[in-house]
Amino acid sequence: MPRADFYLIAKPRFSEQPLLLVCELARKAFAAQQSTLILTRDFPQAEELDELLWSFDEDTYIPHQLAGDDDDENTAVLIVPPGVDIPARPLTINLREQCPQSYGERVLEVVAANPTEREGSRVRWREYQRLGFEVNKFDM
């Protein structure tokens, strides 16, 4: 059964910069050798995340790139802006306002600490349940 985990941001460190939590999740996925897609809301967010993955931790290197290159299938973490079609991977980190069209074994939803984001996450939660996912919530 596929699984969807919702990470609700509460800590000041993440509420000020929600993409830091995405970097932490990508680091854990890479350490566990899980091939990962990060679905961004738009291209500027994809570029911001790309830069942040290079700089958020000086002691950690996470092989990543923006999707759309010949080397996509060999890259551990792919950052995918809308409009780029990529095959599903075991782990998807979803930053978009809708559920992913294709997914692997697990989807991580990162939800910022504002009412609009929370309302959208409730809609996605119900959609995952409808699709037969095991759904969990974690306060971060």
Image: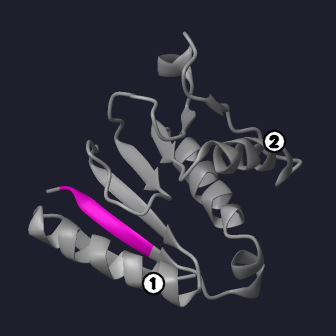
Left or right of 50 in this view: 57: right
Secondary structure under badge 2?
helix
- For label 2, the crowd category at 10 Å Cα-Cα, with few meaning under 14, some 14 to 19 and many 20 or more, is some
Left or right of 91 in this view: 116: right
Give the main secondary structure, helix, strand or loop, of the magenta stretch: strand
The residue that label 1 is drawn on is 118
Magenta region: which residues?
Answer: 2-6
Residue 87, image x and y in percent?
33, 28
Viewer-side residue, 121 vs 37: 121
Name the kind of residue labelled 1 in the image: Arg
Residue at image position (65%, 44%) is 46
Quadrant placement of the N terminus: bottom left
Residue at image position (31%, 58%) is 99
Residue 103, image x and y in percent?
28, 45
Reply above or below: 90 against 137: above
The residue that label 2 is drawn on is 54
Q: Is residue 32 in sight in this rendering? A: no
Reply above or below: 70 against 75: above
Secondary structure under badge 1?
helix
Viewer-side residue, 63 vs 86: 86
Q: Are marks 1 and 2 in contact (CB under 8 Å)?
A: no
What is the quadrant of residue 130 in the picture?
bottom left
Residue 16, image x and y in percent?
77, 78
- For label 1, the crowd category at 10 Å Cα-Cα, with few meaning under 14, some 14 to 19 and many 20 or more, is some
Residue at image position (39%, 76%) is 120
**Label ID, residue 39:** none
Left or right of 105 in this view: 71: right
Q: Mark 1, mark 2: which one is toward the viewer?
A: 1
What is the quadrant of residue 140 in the picture?
bottom right
Name the kind of residue labelled 2 in the image: Trp
Q: Is residue 106 magenta?
A: no
